[in-house]
Image (cartoon, grey):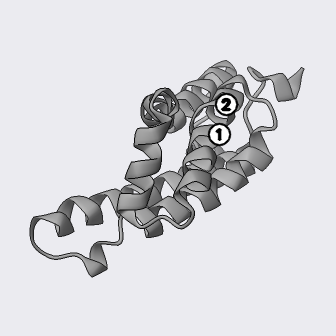
């Protein structure tokens, strides 16, 4: 009966954690790399979304979405970075997807992206609890 309590991933647990880390941060690297390549455009975008201190917001976004993501993939400082990503992702949800202040066609996509960010924050919270697994620099 104990075997029904959970599914034992056995030897593949660490590989699954690596795949999960990559899947969790893939969206960040895909959006962060273009931000890094077009810093001026990123600052303009931050200003257009109403982000406070757009230049600083752009720097924070690039740092979180490129080097910090690479560290999560490598499994280096995974737990503290996961906690930081919880707050970063919640912050971007509130700042970038404030659907409650919008009207018309902007409401639905921003509501979806707001709750997507909430879900991603949950994934980072889970990563902070379970850790990166053995396929990580944290375990070496």
Q: Which residue lies at the image location 48% right of the left edge and 64% below the top edge?
A: 51
Q: Residue furthest left?
A: 104
Few, some or many C-alpha atoms within 10 Å of disc 2 (few <14, some 14-19, many ≥20)?
some
Can residue 119 be seen from the camera position used here? yes
Q: CA distance from mark 2 to mark 1?
A: 6 Å
Residue at (68% x, 19% y) in the render: 11
Location of residue 71 by image quarter: top right
**Residue 106 percent coordinates (x, y):** 17, 65
- Asked whether 30 or 52 is in front, the reply is 52
Please give the name of the residue rendered at 43% of the width and 29% of the height, measured from the top-left corner.
Answer: 34
68 sits to left or right of 42: right
The location of residue 70, given as percent across then percent down, is 65, 27
Residue 53 position by quadrant: bottom right
Count of marks placed on residues:
2
| In this view, 111 is above or below 68 | below
How many residues crowd mark 1 within 10 Å: few (<14), some (14–19), many (20+)?
A: some
Which disc is residue 31 wearing?
none
Residue at 49% across / 28% down in the picture?
Answer: 33
- Seen in the image, is 99 located left or right of residue 45? left
Image coordinates of residue 24 in percent, x first then y, are: 51, 38
Quadrant in which the C terminus is drawn: top right
Give the number of the disc on residue 67.
Answer: 2
Q: Which residue is mark 1?
A: 63
Residue 5 seen in this snapshot: no
Query: Is 101 placed above or below 55 here?
Result: below
Mark 1 residue element: helix
Q: Secondary structure at mark 2?
A: helix
At which x and y percent is residue 98?
A: 35, 72
Q: Are marks 2 and 1 in contact (CB under 8 Å)?
A: yes
């Amino acid at each position: 009966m104990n075997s029904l309590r959970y599914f034992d991933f056995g030897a593949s647990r660490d590989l699954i954690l690596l795949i999960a880390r990559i899947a969790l941060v893939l969206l960040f690297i895909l959006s962060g790399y273009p931000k890094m390549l077009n810093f001026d455009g990123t600052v303009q975008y931050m200003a257009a979304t109403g982000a406070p201190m757009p230049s600083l917001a752009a720097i924070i976004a690039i740092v979180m979405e490129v080097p910090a993501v690479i560290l999560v993939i490598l499994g280096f400082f995974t737990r503290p970075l996961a906690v930081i990503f919880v707050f970063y992702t919640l912050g971007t949800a509130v700042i970038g997807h404030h659907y409650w202040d919008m009207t018309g066609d902007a409401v639905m996509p921003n509501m979806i992206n707001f709750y997507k960010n909430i879900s991603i924050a949950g994934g980072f919270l889970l990563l902070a609890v379970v850790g990166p697994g053995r396929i990580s620099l944290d375990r070496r």
